[in-house]
Image (cartoon, helix red, strand yellow):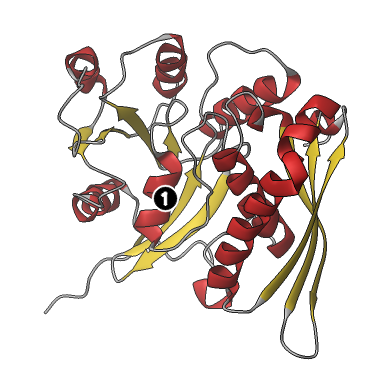
Amino acid sequence: MEPVVQKAGVVAIIGRPNSGKSTLLNNLLGQKVSITSPKPQTTRFAIQAVYEDDRGQIIFVDTPGVVGKVKDQLARRINLEAESQVNKELDLVIYLVDHTRERDLEENKTFGIVRKFQGPKLLVINKIDVVRPTHIVQYKFMEEEFDDVVEISALERKHLGKLLQVIFEFLPEGKPLVQSKDLVQPGLNIDSKTFLSEIIREKAFLFLRREVPYSVTAVVDDVIVRDNGLLYVKARILTSADRYKSMIIGKGGVMVKEISMAARKELETATNKKVYLELTVETDPHWMDTV
């Protein structure tokens, strides 16, 4: 039996907000490295993570969704972050589209970024588990510009094996780019405080009203393992205005307690430890200048 040829490469996942990029990455890896929510701008920076099997190694880059109408510095940086990833050394670009949504300005801007990449490109049509609504005819004309087309459901994990097979077909032969045995978890550019703060921000996105999440971020100040094995996490939710602060706290502190409880439960699952989360809310009108 001939040995399997090892391959290795860097693959960027690019798409408009809420196309399912982070869900795809998490389910390809079999564990959470990138936060998800139904709201746009959930992913604010590129997440790098490693997938490995007997065929070789893939470094996936989950990019922020391209924002159509740029209203603030944060949105502008998100767009620049997405576009900059295509300009880096990549072996393959996955263009992820959601056939249940009509093409619009965001989709056109995203497609324009993908077209600039000179290497192999895959058109991956997501959410095939949803029959209606569908606007798939609006994406069919794109197929001739791509090296292959794969239909998947990232959420239901349908055809992810086929997607991995196609990805490996386009990657160059080579040794692993990183030593996975040295990794505690598959995320390459996420330290423990960043991961914990992202989980808290995800829960804030899920619980808060539509207009509030874009004005918030989360910061972890301390992570301490106490003698009894309890993981103590001290964190803050930062928001840009006092009116949002009162919404995040909620009447009698109910909302921030809900966010804290949901975040604590997920942190316990992720760390396999009992967690005490001390979560406060602060107003900082300049936090967008620092992320």
* Residue 6 in the image, given as x and y percentages of width and height: 32, 65
Q: Name the residue under label 1.
A: 25
Q: Look at 59% across and 30% down and name the residue there.
A: 209
Q: Is residue 35 placed above or below 14 in the rendered structure?
A: below
The quarter of the image holding the C terminus is top right
Residue 172 at least partly seen: yes
Q: How crowded is mark 1: few (under 14 residues within 10 Å), some or many (20 or more)?
A: many
Left or right: 234, with 159 as reference point: right
Q: Is residue 175 placed above or below 139 in the rendered structure?
A: below
For this rendering, which residue is in front, 74 or 4?
74
Residue 179 at least partly seen: no
The quarter of the image holding the N terminus is bottom left
Location of residue 120 by image quarter: top left
* Residue 49 in the image, given as x and y percentages of width and height: 51, 56
Q: Report the amino acid beneath label 1.
A: Leu
Location of residue 79 by image quarter: top right
Give the mark count.
Answer: 1
Q: Look at 45% across and 44% down and name the residue there.
A: 22
* Residue 260 in the image, given as x and y percentages of width and height: 67, 56
For this rendering, which residue is in front, 38 or 243?
243
Question: Residue lying farthest left?
Answer: 1
What kind of element bears circle 1?
A: helix
* Residue 105 in the image, given as x and y percentages of width and height: 45, 9
Left or right: 239, with 207 as reference point: right
Location of residue 143 by image quarter: top left
Q: Look at 65% across and 57% down and name the residue there.
A: 195
Q: Look at 72% across and 33% down and name the residue there.
A: 247
Question: Residue lying farthest front?
Answer: 252
For this rendering, which residue is in front, 231 or 281?
281
For this rendering, which residue is in front, 157 or 80?
157
